[in-house]
Image (spheres, rainbow, N blue to C red):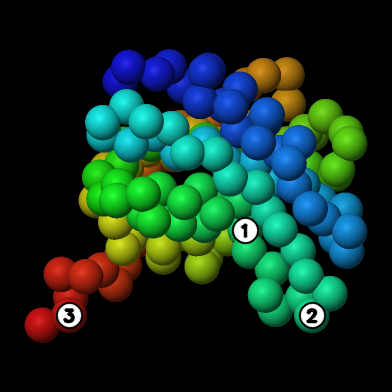
Amino acid sequence: MTTTPDELVRLAKEARGHAYVPYSGFSVGAALLCRDGKIYQGCNIENAAFGPTICAERTAFFKAVYDGEREFEAIAVVGGRAGEEITGLFPPCGVCRQVMREFCDLDFKLYLGREDNRWEERTLGELLPMSFSPADMR
Ligand code: THU
């Protein structure tokens, strides 16, 4: 991988600073590494109607897919109380895991940020076992 996990987590933290979270006060940042080396950052963007809120991971994916990206290597995700340091590991929600599965194989890597610049590595297969994927549409 051209970008190190540490760098990807750093970019996810930077993205977290862009979050629009007037309702939850919980800011999330993501940094998505494409196979061609490009990186797309995303943050959560909330809405007064709640339902239209979008997570940081999907913001990053949809930006990348719009630009024509279809192959992805890894994503770093961090979350915590807005304006505060992160205090623990942030696991992506089920909807975002399913969006990842649309475009990624089970060996897609996730770097889940935690306190003190630490992170934990997981694969999409670990987070979404027995998943429904495009290959199942037959
Ligand atoms: N959120 C994300 O950005 N990613 C996730 O995977 C789960 C939750 C956001 C949505 C909402 O703005 C806030 O975190 C609290 O749920």
Which mark is first along the chain, 1 or 2? 2
| 71 or 87, nearer to the observer | 71
Q: Which residue is mark 2?
A: 49
CA distance for labels 2 and 1: 15 Å
Q: Which residue is mark 1?
A: 55
Amino acid at the residue labelled 2: Ala
Position of 58 with respect to 21 (left or right) is: left
Task: State the residue at coordinates (25%, 45%).
Answer: 71
CA distance for labels 1 and 3: 26 Å
Residue 43 horizontal/vertical position (percent): 65, 47
Amino acid at the residue labelled 1: Cys
Q: Mark on residue 138?
A: none
CA distance for labels 2 and 3: 33 Å
Task: State the residue at coordinates (75%, 47%).
Answer: 19
Task: State the residue at coordinates (51%, 25%).
Answer: 8
| 23 or 86, nearer to the observer | 23
**Other-residue count near label 2 (Cα within 10 Å), few / some / many at <14 / 14–19 / ≥20:** few
Position of 127 with respect to 69 (left or right) is: right
Q: Which residue is mark 3?
A: 137
Task: State the residue at coordinates (61%, 51%).
Answer: 56
The answer to whether the residue bearing label 2 lies less than 8 angstroms from the nearest atom of ligand 1 is no
